[in-house]
Amino acid sequence: MGVLSWTRRGVLAAGTAMALSLGMQAEAQTPPGVLIVGQIAEPKALDPAAVTAVNDFRILMNVYDGLVRYKSGTLEVEPALATGWEISEDGTEYTFTLREGVSFHDGSPFNAEAVVFNFERMLNEDHPYHNTGPFPLAFFFSAVESVEAVDDLTVKFTLNAPYAPFLSNLAYPTGLIVSPAAVEQYGADFGRNPSGTGPFKFAEWRSNEAVVVEANPEYWDGAPGLQAVVFRPITDANTRTAEMLAGGIDMMVEVPPVALSEFQGDAFQIFEQAGPHVWFLILNAKEGPFADKRVRQAANYAINKSALVDDVLEGTAEVAAGPTPPAFAWAYNEELEPYPYDPEKAKELIAEAGAEGAELTFYVTEGGSGMLDPIAMGTAIQADLNAVGFDTKIETYEWNTFLGEVNPGLEGKADMAEMAWMTNDPDTLPFLALRTDAWPDKGGFNSGYYSNSEVDTLLEEARVATDQDKRAELYKEMQSIVQEDAPWVFVANWKQNAVTSDRVEGFELQPSFFLLLDDVVKN
């Protein structure tokens, strides 16, 4: 039976429902060679230049390749579609030699012109297919002045200044290379009809049910060990857990901490991996009570982050001290201490600012990339804030709807919102979410409208510094200022997790938080 026929027949749903009705774990209902992955949400699109969520990236990294990629188990860059590169002495020219004989899944050739097409589509407003966007993370390549096909297998990027994170950003999903022919064929619908060069080829997307990808036997890095992968969006964490226990899915990502103990048998394998993650609350610094720094600091003192980490997250995270994850050891400011839990200090600051009884609208998501246990976290945070005199009201949204509310900015809508980022470089999160020029109306993700000219300068200097020690010094100074200004409540740094059935072999979690499945086998 073909993969598509199998998924359409509904065996998975029927088998799982039967198992749940019997109240016990069933024999696995899934066929060998087909991996069923329980995702946290429906993807927004399958165009790597058009999405921002790790939930979507987990699919994309199996369909596409970039010029470079992260070496397994690290955030170090290694060759992928490029076999090598040279960097000019002044750090403004990167010349890549491309892999020969690679084709996109639609049969069109991968070459230098395809690379040029990809980056001009994102960066050039006059490009004929720029309207297939928007491209929210084009910021990653804002230093690119031009992309030139030197010959069929050589491409040169010229930057407007040295840009230290450039290679790392090329390894990020925004740098994945799509088929120009497919973009030309499907236009704005390309995100529903993807074509890359990766280990798996797109087969089918049934909205709110499944994205199916099938093995690419001609993959340049070796055929994958699976016949197919089915990504199922199961937004409710309890339902996802029940499906995993019942054998309806073979892999579950972002396991709720309270559910980990349910997978302690021989039938399951639990995986954990630290990475650059930060879970925080965006505070609306433009209007309302959080326009006053004292009230933002009060929120940081009011919330018992240790209790959140120990009780809600079951010890699967650590309290965050600032905007930079400690996984970036070379750039992390170890001198910073987290805001202590001090409700009396919070009350003093609130009184000083005249914000007693302030009403707060708090956006909470049902689930999403790296969001841990967002409803339980939000409810606990609401109680802590109300205990120091705020009147906090929660509004809850499905993940993609939540992003549609938060990313355009909180002005006129909310005072605070949950958020989580998994990043690839210490530049990424602050540059996209803390600079003045990253306010939503300027194309960034600074949804709380924080602005500090000193922070802006430090971030601009850090991204052009070619010496890592100098970059580290600048980032550490930035962290000190941001912690004092408190544009966010700094909550937690998470250790990611996943569970697989004992039929799955060859799987590893990555510090990048990507899901790489080309070496996975399922019996």
Image: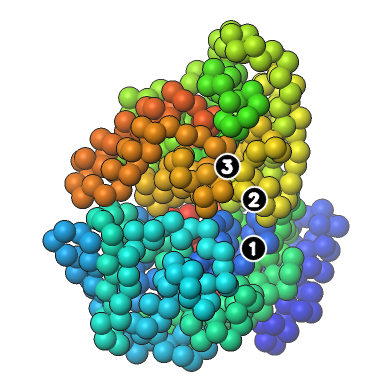
Image quadrant assignment for residue 190: bottom right
Report the amino acid beneath label 2: Leu
Is residue 511 toward the left or the right of residue 112 in the image?
A: right
Label 3, on which residue?
A: 447
Report the amino acid beneath label 1: Lys
| Mark earlier in primary sequence (1, 2) | 1
Mark 2 secondary-structure assignment: helix
Report the amino acid beneath label 3: Ser
Question: Label 3 vs label 2: CA separation?
Answer: 11 Å
Depth check, front residue: 245 or 388: 388
Label 2, on which residue?
A: 403
Neighbour tally class for label 3: few under 14, some 14-19, many 20 plus, Cα within 10 Å: many
Please name which of the two marks, 3 or 2, marks the residue nearer to the observer. 3
Question: Quadrant location of the C terminus?
Answer: bottom right
Residue for point 70% across, 87% down: 1
Give x and y (percent) for residue 193. Answer: 61, 79
Image quadrant assignment for residue 148: bottom left
Please name which of the two marks, 1 or 3, marks the residue nearer to the observer. 3
| Mark earlier in primary sequence (1, 3) | 1
Depth check, front residue: 58 or 122: 122
Question: Label 1 vs label 2: CA separation?
Answer: 10 Å
Label 1, on which residue?
A: 44
